[in-house]
Amino acid sequence: MAYQITPQLRDKINHFCRFPQTGVSLRQMVMFGQNPSQGTLLRATQFLADELPIRIAHRIQELENLPHNLGEMPSIIKVKNWYAQSFEDLINFPKTELPSSLRDKFTSSSIIQKLPDNVPHPANNPGRSGMLNPSIPICRRYYTKVDDIEWPPEVHYYNEKFTKLIEDIKRRHNPVVSTVGKRHKTKTVIETDIQAFLDRFYMSRIGIRILIGQHVALNKLPSRPDYVGIICTKTNIAQAVQEAADNAKFICEEHYGLFRAPEIQLHCSNDLLFTYIPTHLSHMLFELLKNSLRAVVEKFGEADEYPPIKVIVAEGKEDITIKISDEGGGIPRSNIPLVWTYMYTTAPSQHLDPEFNQTDFRAPMAGLGYGLPISRLYARYFGGDLKLISMEGYGTDVYLHLNRISNSDEPLQ
Ligand code: ADP
Ligand code: MG
């Protein structure tokens, strides 16, 4: 039988929707995650046990309120039900497995039980009454490290169980982008309200996946030098570009044939390091380089030589900017707004099987139409941006701005 949202679950979803989501910055994650004790991880468990259902409840509500009756499409209902299942799993996560002395100290036994029905609107309720300690905003709780005392084995066990739960949730949601994307196959109009929705929706998805990925890494991965969970405090840009270039060229030659790929020239100091999530950086570079490779090969066809793609990295105080310049003929000016929309592609459309696990998934050269918009979301997520300037008839420059977190958190006064 298809999954159904029961009236009881509906009440809980509505309840969680009344709370604001709590933002977490890269810097906060780095500070919090250094050599965490089991007590610190328990705090993180507690934070996520409240924060994830809040975020997920908001997504369910958004999916139900989509314009043009899109909320009734089978693919959207499917995605919504994954969110509802994950919501249910999270709010049902047992709090009773902790020693009772810790239970009071560390769990709010879920905001659902503690909060009276008439909680004030979140906007008037910054301390989120009913939580562990009403006077401490939730983000402060997450980021207060707990001393490394002797933690009873139950704490470890409890953290482990929660980690397993959210890992399963992350896996359940792997096919979300390809499933939501499906609806476009029947639509030719690119409605701006839908694009705005998708931006918000995918942005939120990135956030949820970072929180889960970071938590799982802190709990499960052996600590690696220069890493805090999934964050690398010494991400080497030159190395990241080189790897992305190798991977993109590989895919390009596989697609167009051997030697059918321009050279990628890199102008970057080899010791430029900064704090970032390397998988995000690789994703963006890979997508941008594939686009440039494709444009050049398609423009020059079976040429003996292609004009090289130039990657120039600039190190500023605020940003690190990576410029990728190609001579692939550019994009007509009237098409520029379209390249930022989901599913827009000038390549033969690729079918992405939503049931396919993303880890087995081989990236196509082009044809999904997500490369640019999703990369821009990744860039913006941590305060950066992605810009594209084209000279039709000549080529394209793409600017990837990455905010250096050492500055991004300082208050501007
Ligand atoms: P996809 O690569 O799957 O088509 P993208 O979002 O990466 O999706 O790009 C969308 C479209 O933007 C491409 O199909 C192409 O028409 C255009 N485009 C992107 N980058 C470039 C580039 N460097 N040069 C020319 N056209 C580009
Ligand atoms: Mg692309």
Image (cartoon, rainbow, N blue to C red):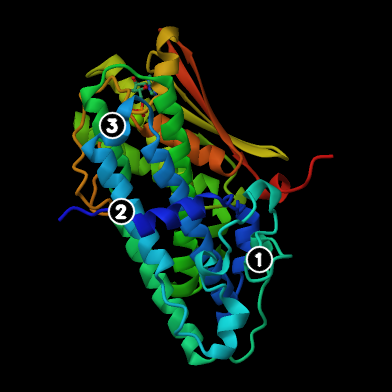
Which of disc 1 and disc 2 is earlier in sequence? 2
Classify residue 71 as left or right of residue 311: left
Foreground of the two, 411 or 302 = 411
Residue 351 placement: quadrant? top left
The amino acid type of the residue labelled 2 equals: Ile
Q: Earlier in the sequence, mark 1 or mark 3?
A: 1
Task: Say whether residue 202 is left or right of residue 47.
Answer: left
Q: Is residue 110 visible?
A: yes
Residue drawn at the location 46% of the way across and 58% of the way down:
53
Query: Label 2's element?
Result: loop
In this view, 302 is above or below 175: above
> What's under tag 3, amino acid-wise?
Leu
Q: Mark 3: few, some, or many residues within 10 Å (few <14, many ≥20)?
A: many
Dot 3 or dot 2: first in sequence order is 2
Secondary element at image label 3: loop
Q: Image check: 222 left or right of 117?
A: left
Label 3 CB sits under 8 Å from any ligand 1 atom: yes
Please give the residue where the numbered disc 3 appears in the rendered image: 368
Q: Residue at left 20%, top 49%?
A: 356
The circle drawn on residue 143 is 1
Circle 1 crowding by C-alpha within 10 Å: few under 14, some 14–19, many from 20:
some
Q: Is residue 36 visible?
A: no
Q: From the viewer's perspective, is the residue at label 3 or at label 2 nearer? A: 2
State the image coordinates of residue 320 (x, y, percent, origin top left): 62, 39
Residue for badge 2: 5
